[in-house]
């Protein structure tokens, strides 16, 4: 008999951001039981769990609203003890602002945080020492709004996606310099392969197109060759993709955001989203499954067996068995009609 994908997860925890909470909620990964909630600053966005310090980092990007429609950019990161479920510290990055994407290098004890630019400086990536929890550097990305950020397993190369800028910024993490710009028509989420040879980037930028645009670039995931810093392939999707995630088993997970025509809004209204799965090696599509409205963040269990898809417009997290592409459960994170689920982090039980 095949073992349940939930087996052996007792003590593991899933952390979920609610933008409208504003909270970080914790759920038992085996039973989906709600364990507790931590109140955080307004507009929390992404999460990153550091297993070496056993701390959870949370970005807070804006005072209210979202990218290009907000009342001002925040400057803080919230550091949370996920076991005690309490705030350890709020780290202020000022004058840096609009922190969003998070990438962790446990070997070098470095956390990378994408920040937005200003009138006199482009966007960039702030480098934080995870032991002292203090900034130790900044890398310019030459774009106004780097949003998501990912690094290769060696901790030498980083990739920042830029919504409006027509390129992905490639940075040398050792020298702290911008080394290349890979041409794409705006970009969203991304992931880097386990061997560091390729990056998978969602493109184009979804906010530029309406539900009925026919002349938008091919939607999908651009495959970037790290050696040549160029696009070598595209994994096609039917609709715009926002989040991209790579599992430990070599599956590329894409969150498609279908839109329907709406007489009130040029961009349209959300239809049920899709989790689309590709093989990172063969680049073939392995299947897809319907999820909530506007998937915005994806993560997976360490064994690559289960996917978690946070859908901000429906305030839900879909839990999916990646071997059968079957939905296991749906978590409801915020009040219906309010922007909800965003950042995710899978937290294994203490050793």
Image (tube, helix red, strand yellow):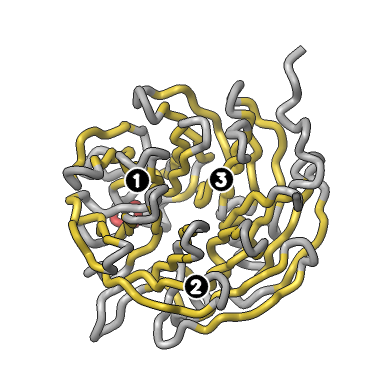
Which residue is painted at 51% across and 35% down in the image? 275
Q: Position of residue 128 (x, y in %)?
A: 47, 73
SS at mark 3?
strand
| Badge nearest the viewer, 2 or 1 | 2
Q: Nearer the viewer, residue 302 or 60?
A: 302
What number is the disc on residue 32?
none
Which is more N-terminal, label 2 or label 3?
2
Q: Which mark is residue 299?
A: 3
Q: Which residue is mark 1?
A: 202
Say which quadrant the N terminus sits in: top right
Identify the residue shown where x is 63% and y is 29%. 321
Give the labeled residue for mark 2. Answer: 129
Percent x, y for residue 238?
A: 36, 33
Q: Nearer the viewer, mark 3 or mark 2?
A: 2
* Left or right: where 189 falls relative to 77: left
- How many residues crowd mark 3 within 10 Å: few (<14), some (14–19), many (20+)? many
Q: Nearer the viewer, mark 1 or mark 3?
A: 3
């Amino acid at each position: 008999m095949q073992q349940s994908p939930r087996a052996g997860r007792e003590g593991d925890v899933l952390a979920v951001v609610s933008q409208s909470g504003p909270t970080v909620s914790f759920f038992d990964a085996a039973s989906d039981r709600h364990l507790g909630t931590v109140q955080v600053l307004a507009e929390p966005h992404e999460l990153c769990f550091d297993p070496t310090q056993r701390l959870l980092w949370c970005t807070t990007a804006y005072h209210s609203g979202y990218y290009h429609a907000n009342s001002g950019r925040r400057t803080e990161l919230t550091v949370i003890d996920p076991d005690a479920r309490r705030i350890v510290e709020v780290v202020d990055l000022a004058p840096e602002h609009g922190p969003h994407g998070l990438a962790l290098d446990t070997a070098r004890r470095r956390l990378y945080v994408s920040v937005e630019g200003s009138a006199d400086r482009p966007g960039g990536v702030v480098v934080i020492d995870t032991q002292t929890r203090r900034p130790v550097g900044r890398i310019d990305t030459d774009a106004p709004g780097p949003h998501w950020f990912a690094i290769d397993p060696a901790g030498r190369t980083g990739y920042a996606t830029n919504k409006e800028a027509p390129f992905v910024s490639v940075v040398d993490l050792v020298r702290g310099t911008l080394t290349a710009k890979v041409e794409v028509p705006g970009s969203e989420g991304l992931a880097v392969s386990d061997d560091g040879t390729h990056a998978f980037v969602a493109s184009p930028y979804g906010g530029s197109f309406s539900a009925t645009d026919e002349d938008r670039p091919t939607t999908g995931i651009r495959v970037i060759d790290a050696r040549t810093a160029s696009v070598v392939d595209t994994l096609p999707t039917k609709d715009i993709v926002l989040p991209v995630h790579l599992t430990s088993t070599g599956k590329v997970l894409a969150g498609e955001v279908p839109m329907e025509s709406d007489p009130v809004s040029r961009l349209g209204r959300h239809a049920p989203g899709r989790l689309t799965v590709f093989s990172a090696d063969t680049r073939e599509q392995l299947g897809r499954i319907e999820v909530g409205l506007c998937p915005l963040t994806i993560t997976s269990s360490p064994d690559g067996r289960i996917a978690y898809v946070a859908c901000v417009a429906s305030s839900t997290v879909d839990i999916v068995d990646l071997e059968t592409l079957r939905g296991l459960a749906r978590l409801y994170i915020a009040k219906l009609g309010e922007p909800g689920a965003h950042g995710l982090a899978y937290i294994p039980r203490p050793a």
